[in-house]
Amino acid sequence: MSSLRGYCGIDCGECDAYIATINRDEALKARTAEQWSKELGIEMKPGELTCLGCKSNVNTKYCGECPIRSCNETKGIEICADCEDYPCERIESFLNQMPQVRTLLDQLNEIRRRFSK
Ligand code: SF4
Ligand code: SF4
């Protein structure tokens, strides 16, 4: 699994915060901050969008405080698909907004179940 695949299954390599950070693209950070502020209902400033991916130690405040991330870290797993409790209510509410990520996690979870029999 790519180190840019987040605990929730999202691909951080496709995230505008990550892309803006590695390219030092301040205009993209500004556009992304404006867009995310509207979508998430939380004011975000461009300077707060520095992120090198979910599993790095350089994160946006939003993802740095993500309960899905801390839950995976507590369980010592790399992705929710490897969790005995998948799909829990927390990941369900996230996946309801991210159908393509649900497909990936469902497939990985199915493989994990088959091989753990
Ligand atoms: S952890 Fe960073 S790169 Fe990944 S989704 Fe969150 S903001 Fe984007
Ligand atoms: S309990 Fe839910 S959020 Fe936590 S690791 Fe398992 S599936 Fe992910």
Image (cartoon, rainbow, N blue to C red):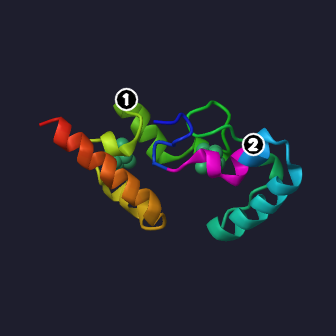
Magenta residue check for 69 = no
**Residue 102 makes an appearance in the image:** yes
| Residue 105 position in % (x across, y down) | 37, 51
Residue 85 in view here = no
Q: Residue at x 25, y 40 (%)?
A: 112
Q: Is residue 39 above or below residue 115?
A: below
Q: Is residue 85 above or below residue 56?
A: below
> Disc 1, disc 2: CB below 8 Å?
no
Residue 62 percent coordinates (x, y): 62, 50
- Percent coordinates x, y for residue 57 in the rendering: 63, 30
Residue under label 2: 50
Q: Quadrant of residue 34?
A: bottom right
Q: Secondary structure at mark 1?
A: loop
Q: Nearer the viewer, residue 15 or 62?
A: 15
Q: To which residue does mark 1 refer?
A: 76
Is residue 23 rendered to the left or right of residue 42? right
Compared across the picture, whether 103 is left or right of 53 comes to left
Is residue 16 one of those drawn in magenta? yes
Magenta span: 10-18
Determine the secondary structure under disc 2: loop
Instruction: Name the foreground residue: 42 vs 18.
Output: 18
Picture quarter containing residue 72?
A: top left
The answer to whether 25 appears left or right of 56 in the picture is right
Residue located 85% across and 42% down the image: 24
In the visual, does 42 lie left or right of 63? right
Q: Is residue 4 above or below residue 41?
A: above
Q: Amino acid at mark 1?
A: Gly
**Crowd around label 1: few <14 · some 14–19 · many ≥20 (10 Å):** few
